[in-house]
Image (cartoon, rainbow, N blue to C red):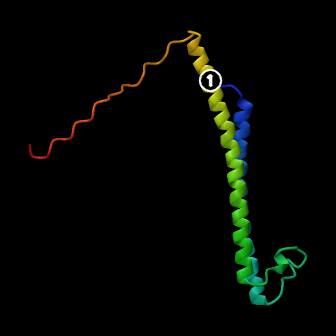
């Protein structure tokens, strides 16, 4: 069967890439925020480099830096799950469409069904004890 909806498959892949990039950037941002908090905590005052930034200038210690870093990681994780779930939802829709089309193809008699897998309803025999 030919693959259809190539653009949706591409969009699904792009969502997965965006999810991973967002998570990695969020993790790196969290590490930078913790480092800024620790550096400003030792200096005792905000650094002139981050004085104009709204959040980074308030982090004047290791504890506020860690709290902000954990918050950023949580937001990045939620963002990752949302984007990845959208990608998987697209994949589920594509799989349903493909299976439905294949079933209709076989029901119309346009193809031959593959043989069913062998199924045994009998219990497997226990292995013989060693030494016999």
Question: Which residue has dot 1 on it?
Answer: 100
Please name whichever residue, 75 or 24, is drawn nearer the observer in this view of the structure. 75
Q: Is residue 31 visible?
A: no
Q: Is residue 126 visible?
A: yes
Q: Quadrant of residue 41?
A: bottom right
Q: Please give the name of the residue rendered at 68% of the width and 40% of the height, measured from the top-left corner.
A: 89
Please name whichever residue, 49 or 123, is drawn nearer the observer in this view of the structure. 123
Q: Quadrant of residue 3?
A: top right
Q: Please give the name of the residue rendered at 65% of the width and 42% of the height, measured from the top-left corner.
A: 88
Q: How many marks can you see?
A: 1
Please name whichever residue, 37 or 64, is drawn nearer the observer in this view of the structure. 64
User: Relative to 40, does residue 56 appear above or below in the rendering?
Assistant: above
| Furthest-left residue in this view | 132
| Furthest-right residue in this view | 52
Percent coordinates x, y for residue 59 in the rendering: 79, 80
Percent coordinates x, y for residue 14 in the rendering: 72, 43
Q: Quadrant of residue 51?
A: bottom right
Percent coordinates x, y for residue 43 in the rendering: 78, 89
Quarter occupied by the N terminus: top right
Please name whichever residue, 27 or 126, is drawn nearer the observer in this view of the structure. 126
Q: Secondary structure at mark 1?
A: helix
User: Relative to 80, does residue 54 appear above or below in the rendering?
Assistant: below
Quarter occupied by the C terminus: top left
User: Relative to 15, does residue 112 appear above or below in the rendering?
Assistant: above
Percent coordinates x, y for residue 103 in the rendering: 58, 19
Q: Alpha-carbon neighbours of circle 1 within 10 Å: few (<14), some, or many (≥20)?
A: few
Q: Is residue 60 left or right of residue 126?
A: right
Q: Is residue 124 left or right of residue 31?
A: left
């Amino acid at each position: 069967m030919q693959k259809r909806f190539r653009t949706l498959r591409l969009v699904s892949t792009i969502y997965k890439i965006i999810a991973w990039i967002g998570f990695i950037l969020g993790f790196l941002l969290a590490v930078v925020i913790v480092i800024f908090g620790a550096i400003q905590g030792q200096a005792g005052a905000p650094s002139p480099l981050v004085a104009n930034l709204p959040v980074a200038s308030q982090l004047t210690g290791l504890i506020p830096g860690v709290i902000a870093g954990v918050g950023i990681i949580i937001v990045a994780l939620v963002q990752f799950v949302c984007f990845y779930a959208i990608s998987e939802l697209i994949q589920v829709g594509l799989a349903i469409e493909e299976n439905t089309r294949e079933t209709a193809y076989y029901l119309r008699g346009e193809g031959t069904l593959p043989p069913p897998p062998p199924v045994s309803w009998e219990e497997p025999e226990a292995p013989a004890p060693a030494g016999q």
